[in-house]
Image (cartoon, rainbow, N blue to C red):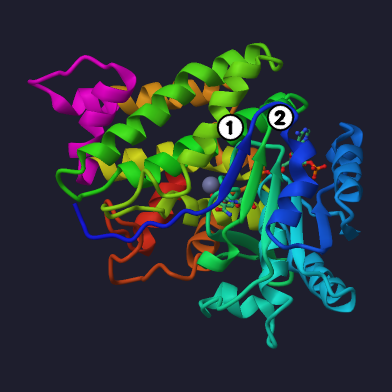
Amino acid sequence: MLNFSFCSPTHFEFGKGTEKETGALIARFGGKKILLHYGGGSIKKSGLYDRVTASLRESGLAFVELGGVVPNPESGLVYKGIELCRKENVDFVLAVGGGSAIDSAKAIAAGAVYDGDFWDFFEGKTIEKALPIGVILTLAAAGSEGSSNSVVTNEKTNEKRGCYGEVIRPLFSILNPELTQTLPHYQTAAGATDIMVHVIERYFSNTKEVEITDRLCEAVLKTMIYETPRVLENPDNYEARANIMWAGMVAHNNLCGVGREQDWASHGMEHELSSFYGATHGAGLAVICPAWMKFVSRVNPAKFIQFAVRVWNCQMNFEHPEITVRDGIEQFENFLRKIGMPSSIKEFGAKEEDIPKLARHIGRVSESEKNFGGYVKLNLSDVEEIYRLAL
Ligand code: NZQ
Ligand code: ZN
């Protein structure tokens, strides 16, 4: 196991009706003037907006609001949010929604107290400070409710980039599984895929003897394999929604990733599909991740045997372990198709001739050196090959 630091101080309020605690929680964390930040209107349709604003009023908190966050959030609205926070002396940012509303809120919170352009953070500048952030989660997927990351798209350059900073980790997150019952089938399935791939990015590691994190990863994956079909069959299944919601948090606050090398090539490749074709993040991963598996398992099959046997209950073929490897990947792929995820990047509009552009646009991939990803280090032609396998 490698040395690590782990500090994940977000306060979680989990369960039915917990959004009623919003005002009290913000007051407890010192907020007085709030920016209420949300997406395209699902929270108004569901009645959540009314309950949240009532809770803010009951706690005597003043607020301004900014809706309109689009999936794969864009920098334009972040600039607007920063301006609004400064003009209105906002001292606390509340995100209500999925990963996009949360990530946009994190970028606003960091940008509002920074003299330069907030995009600097997405080009590697350290985030020194940010306004405090609270979250009400409506979609189990990105894990942003417990993570210290934000992912934003610069719509002018099509760059979808991430930034990192402990100061943008939410102070509290309200997780009421009932709020996810209004999600469409596709969004629930894409969210489940994202959760699974957050674990896979950590599971496929060359670090030896990390049994505890291996077993945590396997537990989250098995939970998702069990609960996702149940929730798709019956969207009102509270218990299944609850297990998925907590799995989404556990998958990405790095509990499953400490002490081990991680991969993240699939996420890097998927971000290009989101930024160029507007692919839903989880749906993009559903195509890219199995393609990545097919490619890297040829070079480094070891962990794929464990994945097949422990996660998918495949029979170990001692004479032909490559068959066990193939079975595990096939089981994963079949699961994704069964829950309604796409099987080709063509479904997002990608064409064979786009592939060199997609691979180059990632930016961090070298033509000569193998330096991208962790489990197997990839160069530009490897990445192109993976996109081709995903066609
Ligand atoms: O905008 P509204 O009207 O709210 O509708 C949203 C949106 O259209 C809808 N939705 C959300 N909750 C709903 C609902 N519809 C009905 N009922 C509900 N309860 O779902 C749509 C998608 O929402 P979005 O927030 O975009 O989805 P998700 O949570 O999957 O977030 C995706 C974003 O998170 C980033 C992704 O790259 C993508 O930009 N990620 C962020 C990470 C992080 N910060 O740590 C890590 C992830 O790997 C991921 O990259
Ligand atoms: Zn993700």
Image position of 110 with respect to 192: above or below: below
Q: Is residue 100 magenta?
A: no
Kindly state the secondary structure of the residue where label 1 is placed: helix
x and y percentages locating residue 198 in the rendered image = 45, 43
Name the residue at 81% across, 49% down. 39
Q: Quadrant of residue 308?
A: top left
| The residue stretch that appears in magenta | 298-326
| Mark 1 Cα-neighbour bin, 10 Å: few <14, some 14–19, many ≥20 | many
Determine which residue is flagged by label 1.
Answer: 245
Check the image and name the residue furthest to the bottom.
Answer: 115
Residue at figure coordinates x 28%, y 55% from the top left:
261
Q: Are marks 2 and 1 in contact (CB under 8 Å)?
A: yes
Q: Find out if the beta carbon at label 2 lies less than 8 Å from the nearest ligand 1 atom.
A: yes
Instruction: Where is residue 16? Give x, y as percent.
Output: 71, 26
Which label belongs to residue 268?
none
Q: In the image shown, does 204 or 347 lie closer to the viewer?
A: 204
Horizontal side, residue 65 vs residue 148: left or right:
right
Quadrant of ligand 1: it is top right
Magenta span: helix, strand or loop, mainly? helix
* Mark 1 C-beta closer than 8 Å to ligand 1: no
Question: Which amino acid, mark 1?
Answer: Met
Is 322 included in the stretch rendered in magenta? yes
Residue at left offset 65%, top offset 62%: 152
Secondary structure under the numbered disc 2 in the rendered image: helix
